[in-house]
Amino acid sequence: MTGLLGALLPAVPLVAGLLGLLLPPAPRHPTAGAGSGDRARRVAVALGVTGAAGALALAVALLVTVDEPRETSTTWVDIGGLTVTLGVRLDGAAALVAVAVTAVALAVQVYSIGYLRRGPHDDVDVDHRYPPYAAQISLFTAAMLLVVVAGDLVMLLVGWEVMGLCSYLLIAHDRRLPGAPAAAMKAFLVTRVGDVGFLLGIALLGVSTGSFRIADVLAHDHSGATLTAAGLLLLAGVAGKSAQFPLHTWLPDAMAGPTPISALIHAATMVAAGVYAVARLYPLFTAAPVTLTVLGVIGAITLLLGALAATAQDDIKRVLAWSTVSQLGYMTGALAVGSPSAALFHLLTHAAFKALLFLAAGAVIHAVGTTLMSEMGGLRRCMPVTFWCTVVGLGALAGVPPLAGFWSKDGVLTVAEAAAREGTGPAPSWVGWLVWLAGLVGVAITAWYAGRLLLRTFFGTPRLPLVQPHDPPALLRWPVLLLAVPAALLGLAGFVGAFADRLRFPTVPVAGAEDGLVHLGPGLLLPLALLLVGAGLVVLGWRRDRTADPASALGPLRPVFARAFRLDDVQHALVVRPVRALARVARTGDEVVVDGAVEGSGRAASALGAGLAALHRAALPRAAAGVLAGALLIGLAAALIGGTR
């Protein structure tokens, strides 16, 4: 029965998505075929919401029924000693992540009904492609759920790649925006770079094991070189999907997509897939400590890079995007110091408060018509529901007790401190120091930019006085209100032993500091002090001049942080330009050499034919002379040949 539930979990949204793709798009103009367009939209809404709700019900059923790891599989392909299976691998962690994925997906489906609706004053129907949009969300959800429950690396890879395709389609949904297609292409190409390594890592493990079944791969006695090589290749894919340095540059640009899609990508699907994949295969990484060392360095850099970049953004969505990059650094840092449980705990709480923040930001954008905080301000009184939900989300992001993010972030810092001071992690102790110190600095910076976002958006005087904002309608308001509950309270679940036990993997030894998900003690004081420092600095700066941007205090560093240390430009100079130059050389070679040879041979044949045709059309005397000359030459050749004999 459990195996059937696991198989149905990705199948339900998959079927809803495939059926939704058969629906026609709504007409671009409200008067053209309005009846059929409205009918298609209603069916798309029903399919999307039903698929997400059904998947959520199945995930909850799995969470209730799965009390120990279970696996069902059947051989699909056996070629040359390599076995590919179809099956599911279920445990408590998979059930909890599945609940998070489906809950966010359902919230996004409901929220999108109101967010992607043509308003009475819109001169362009922005909603005429709603049926494929809803279907693609369902396929996106199914792909992530396949990654969650897959019992075979090939199945996991299928879900991994389908997510990449769906992200491309969804980011580029609103094609009227000039940046959307380019952002979608960038996300697709950057993640593909990492996916090449991910594919090679899976192939290396499969060939070494003789099977792609995850249980077989984990049980096999791999050589050290194989584990190191495969682990580093897998980390390339993780860096792409989970936006880790240096493949993080696609995620902020992906904000060109609709805001609900930003919530879906950032909260519970694409960026969480890399962290979950490492946790799923964690015994392989602990057996090759160099891979965790690399992961720790990447995570610490990503944590600080994302936090610093978030301090100088004016676009509210880009602030949240860079905060996602930073929070993913906490998760990969927890994995590097030996605690997949702490990483998954922060993944779950982050899914709740980041989905809340993006949907609340969407409500603000829906009300004021801009994403720029410099054009907002004074929204606290006219949008009280959105304001208080944003306070909860930003508090959880910054780690304000007792909100969810406080407990999960403290869990990461505690295991990092233990790895640094006591050497309890699988990586060298200096990796623990790096992750711990980066995490502490990140606490202060996160509190600063979270406070700046709140002050610039909801306090002060309105900077667009002609706009009359208000709280969103029910379809947008209720998903935000419901997500505020886990954003506030989910961290307290860490005190429940059954919840903590579900986040532990039976194949992963418990680290010395991992006796529980939450920790009460003197170690909480330092993060809290840094939190107060960051929040206090931004409030003091704002009180001096309530019309000025607190980011002006960054001085000459502000443009550097706003451009994220110009790493995008570095990638463009080192990768994009050389690749384009190579493409131009290849195109020139193809056109000049290959096409030139083919077209040249054709022109030569045409010229020879033209010459022969001219001779064929020659006058009779010249033709007779040619015949006689030919006969003479043939006779002369025959005489010479006969004479030589």
Image (cartoon, helix red, strand yellow):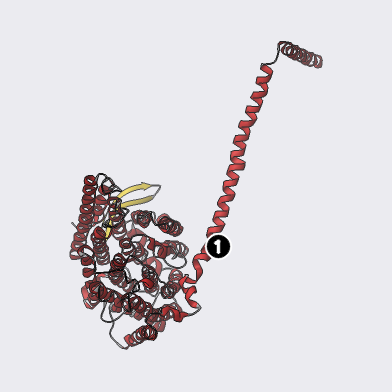
In the rendering, at what x and y percent does residue 230 appear?
A: 44, 61
**Quarter of the rendering occupied by the N terminus:** bottom left
Circle 1: residue type: Leu
Residue at 49% from the left image edge and 71% from the top image edge: 565
Depicted 255 relative to depicted 334: above or below: above
Residue 378 vertical position relative to residue 285 in the rendered view, above or below: below
- 32 or 317, nearer to the observer: 32
Camera sees residue 543: yes
Q: Quadrant of the C terminus?
A: top right
- As rendered, which of 267 and 214 lies closer to the eye? 267
Residue 631, quarter of the rendered image: top right
Res 500 visible: no
Image position, residue 66 (x, y; %) = 21, 64
SS of the residue under disc 1: helix
Point out the residue furthest to the front here.
466
> Relative to residue 222, is residue 128 drawn left or right?
left
- Nearest the camera: 524 or 497? 524
Q: Give the residue pinned by disc 1.
A: 574
Q: Quadrant of residue 389?
A: bottom left
**Crowd band around label 1 with a 10 angstrom C-alpha radius: few (<14), some (14–19), many (20+):** few
In this rendering, the answer to whether 35 lies above or below 635 is below
**What x and y, as percent, mark residue 477?**
22, 67
Residue 181 spot, x, y in % from top left:
41, 55
**Left or right of residue 391, residue 217 in this image:** right
